[in-house]
Image: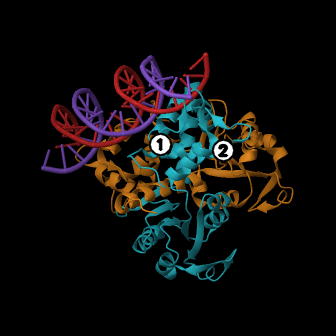
Chain colours: A cyan, B orange, C red, D purple
Amino acid sequence: MSTDLPAVSDSTIRRLSLYLRALEGLDDQAEPTVSSRRLAELAGTSAAQVRKDLSRFGSFGKRGLGYSVAPLQNHLRDILGLQRRWPVVLVGAGRIGSALFEYPYFRERGFEIVAVVDRDPAKVGRRWNGVKIQSVEALPTLVRECRAELGILAIPATDAQAAAEALVDAGVRGILNFAPVQLHLGSHVVVNDVNLTLEMEALSFALRTASELGSGEGG
Amino acid sequence: MSTDLPAVSDSTIRRLSLYLRALEGLDDQAEPTVSSRRLAELAGTSAAQVRKDLSRFGSFGKRGLGYSVAPLQNHLRDILGLQRRWPVVLVGAGRIGSALFEYPYFRERGFEIVAVVDRDPAKVGRRWNGVKIQSVEALPTLVRECRAELGILAIPATDAQAAAEALVDAGVRGILNFAPVQLHLGSHVVVNDVNLTLEMEALSFALRTASELGSGEGG
DNA sequence: AGCTGTGAATATGTTCACAGCG
DNA sequence: CGCTGTGAACATATTCACAGCT
């Protein structure tokens, strides 16, 4: 069933995800095949890059024709591991946790938040669309019961390291971390940080650079 | 006042942001200087990388001693363009928009959401902590009135391109995009995408790779 | 002719290793 | 002696360019 998995860079994987999204946005009745050039345009990269990325996993295209949309979608889902359901444990029922719980695109891709915990006793016991918010003490049991291998941390920086360790101890191997702190975990655990402040700061830097080129220094 | 800005890679800038965060987490009474090694540890990179990154912008350290925490913080804020206030327009008052509006770390760094618009008439007119949600039609006027150069898109993919163009037409030069779609804008506009599904898919891929190495293919 | 798949060429980013200052 | 700053060595990623199938 599953594709062989050669060593491949993180940026390639991220682009595969963009290709999948682009393909899903295509009407495969009207456009049953795409060229690498078209796919590149949709995903914001170059045609050569598209071909290189895809060719690492197989020969999915036809010369002279391009790639068939529906089969390529399936190849990408297979490569990315999306041909299954991924139960996810959410730590933190604040604003961000709530937004993620409601985020429709997660469930579409098979990422299903099956348990929510929060340290605030006032929140514990509430129900979100059938999922009861539980105490952080219940975390180890919950992770094991729902066999979650993925966790999302949407809590303050101060609590994040301890919560991450609890997740890992209970069997989680991949964490999406919204807490603004560097997590230190075993090398078998994969952590992806979402750092919103960093994103804004990168914009700030870019804008500052642009204006200084145009208008000089004088304060 | 401001530091010279040589051409520098995006990954360097992102690490500068991590260094700043790490420095802010230090007690500069107890630890008035840091070595590149220590800073690397805190930020999750290597000592050589820290030195290379910083040396692109100046010689901030003292040989034999390390970097003084408080001055280095200021250098980084200066480089990143954080020695000022950045008014920000938020497009989209849904779950994610709401979470971002409340996000405390933005304001701490000078990113202040000064206007919110939504296309849903039911939301228009509500007040969030003193900021009134306005109609999307008001967007151009709002951007100009508050002189916002930064915008955040927290709306569905279908509306994102049009909203982005409206922002840019009104003077926005940097966009943080949460909509799951590739924006096509003039090259003078900087777009940073936050793609939550992609982050989960990258985890999914990593976990799939790890288990297949350990346990073979069968069913 | 059109478009993929891919080695070779190039560009970019990271690590090494050490000279040189404090 | 410790630690930065940095050129040189290395590793990685992207682009080029074209052979080879359809």
Q: Quadrant of residue B149?
A: top right
- x and y percentages locating residue B206 in the rendered image: 44, 55
> What chain is tagged by disc 2?
B
x 63%, y 45%: residue: A70
In front of the other: A136 or B172: A136
Residue bearing the label numbered 1:
A12
Q: Amino acid at mark 1?
A: Thr
Q: Is residue B219 above or below residue D17?
A: below
Residue D3 located left or right of residue A91: left
Q: Amino acid at mark 2?
A: Val
x 34%, y 51%: residue: B40
- x and y percentages locating residue A105 in the rendered image: 65, 57
Number of numbered discs: 2
Q: Which mark is residue B141?
A: none
Name the mark nearer the viewer: 1 or 2. 1
x 50%, y 39%: residue: A54
In front of the other: A64 or A170: A64
Q: Secondary structure at mark 2?
A: loop
Asked if residue B193 shows in the view, the reply is: no
- Residue that protrudes farthest toward the right in the picture: B121
- x and y percentages locating residue B134 in the rendered image: 82, 52
Q: Secondary structure at mark 1?
A: helix
Density class for disc 2 (Cα within 10 Å; few <14, some 14-19, many ≥20) is: many
Q: Is residue A211 above or below residue B12?
A: above
Asked if residue A152 shows in the view, the reply is: yes
In front of the other: B147 or B198: B198
x 42%, y 71%: residue: A171
Residue bearing the label numbered 2:
B181
User: Do tags 1 and 2 sit on the same chain?
Assistant: no
Using the numbered discs, state the Cα–Cα distance from disc 1 to disc 2 in whole angstroms.
18 Å
Residue B140 located left or right of residue A158: right
